[in-house]
Amino acid sequence: HYSEGSGRDRYMRRTFGISEAEYELRFQAQVGLCAICGKPETNRDHRTGAIRSLAVDHDHATGQVRGLLCRKCNTAIGLLGDTAESVAAAVRYLGGEV
């Protein structure tokens, strides 16, 4: 699927510090499913109609890759500020604890 030096490989290395091969290894380890919801990606590219790749989730402070997420989960944690505290507050709220 990948070729070292491809546009996607260069993008992955520059943006996330991993090669396309490393992405593929993570994808295989996660069996192609989102690390949060456990579902496959369903978001489609608006131009081609093809299902998008899982997003590379990373800690914005350290750059450390955490895992691969579907667009919904990646967007959700991003909107919650990418912090465990804000996600925990949302869980407490949903559980009626607030």
Image (cartoon, rainbow, N blue to C red):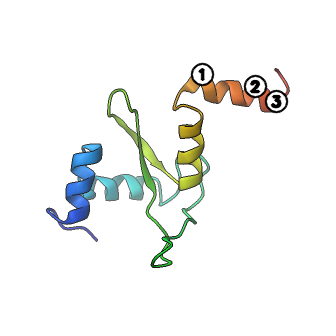
Instruction: Tell me the residue that label 3 is attached to.
Output: 95
Instruction: Tell me the residue that label 1 is attached to.
Output: 85
Q: What is the residue that sits farthest to the front in this orientation? A: 47
Near mark 3 (Cα within 10 A), the count class, few <14, some 14-19 or many ≥20, is few
In the picture, measured across the screen, residue 58 lies left or right of residue 34, that is left
Closest to the observer, 83 or 33: 83
- Locate residue 29, reporting x and y percent: 41, 53
Helix, strand or loop for disc 3: loop
Earlier residue among tags 1 and 2? 1
- Res. 65 image quadrant: top left
Instruction: Tell me the residue that label 2 is attached to.
Output: 92
Quadrant containing the C terminus is: top right
Earlier residue among tags 1 and 3? 1
Residue drawn where x is 40% and y is 58% of the image = 28
Near mark 1 (Cα within 10 A), the count class, few <14, some 14-19 or many ≥20, is few
Please say if the residues under marks 3 and 2 sit with CB atoms less than 8 Å apart: yes
Amino acid at circle 2:
Arg
Amino acid at circle 3:
Gly
Determine whether 77 is above or below 84 in the image: below
Residue drawn where x is 45% and y is 79% of the image = 48
